[in-house]
Amino acid sequence: MSEITSAAKKWDEHHRSWRNRAYKLVGRAVKLGVLPPAYNLTCADCGNPAAVYDHRDYRDALNVTPVCVRCNFKRGW
């Protein structure tokens, strides 16, 4: 059981580092004007005003989709 826990812990730490890097890169891209703020866009899923950018793969940090809070929750991890 400890091997599984250890592997899960390593994966979680690795996942968090990619996620944090992706969030920072998107924030910088918005600040520099490379990406528009999400709230200026419409949700890709439902057409309502977007609130955030969704990452499907944190390793591809700038491959994001603008979504509203509801659709971001539906998409999950």
Image: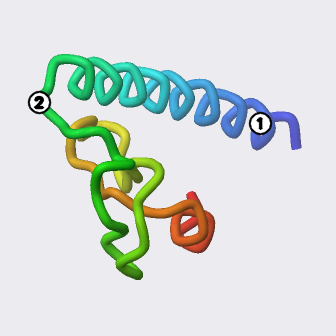
Q: Nearer the viewer, residue 11 or 28?
A: 28
Name the residue located 47 percent from the left edge and 52 percent from the top edge. 51
Q: Amino acid at mark 1?
A: Glu
Badge 2: few (under 14), some or many (20 or more) residues near its Cα, within 10 Å? few
Mark 2 secondary-structure assignment: loop
Callout 1: few (<14), some (14-19), or many (20+) C-alpha neighbours within 10 Å?
A: few
Give the x, y percent position of residue 57. Answer: 35, 49
- Residue 22: x and y in percent read 36, 29
Give the residue displayed 41% in from the left and 64% down from the top.
Answer: 49
Answer with left or right where residue 60 lies relative to residue 54.
left
Quarter the C terminus occupies: bottom right
The residue singled out by tag 1 in the image is 3
- Viewer-nearest residue: 31 or 12: 31
Front-most of residues 21 and 3: 21
From this view, report whether residue 5 is shown above or below residue 29. Answer: below
Nearer-the-camera pick, 8 or 4: 8
- Cα–Cα span, label 2 and label 1: 43 Å
Residue 50 appears left or right of 33: right
Q: Which residue is mark 2?
A: 34
Q: Are marks 2 and 1 in contact (CB under 8 Å)?
A: no
At 62% from the left and 65% from the top, the residue drawn is 73
Q: Quick check: 72 left or right of 63? A: right
Does residue 10 appear left or right of residue 48 in this picture?
A: right
Q: For residue 61, which quarter of the picture?
A: top left
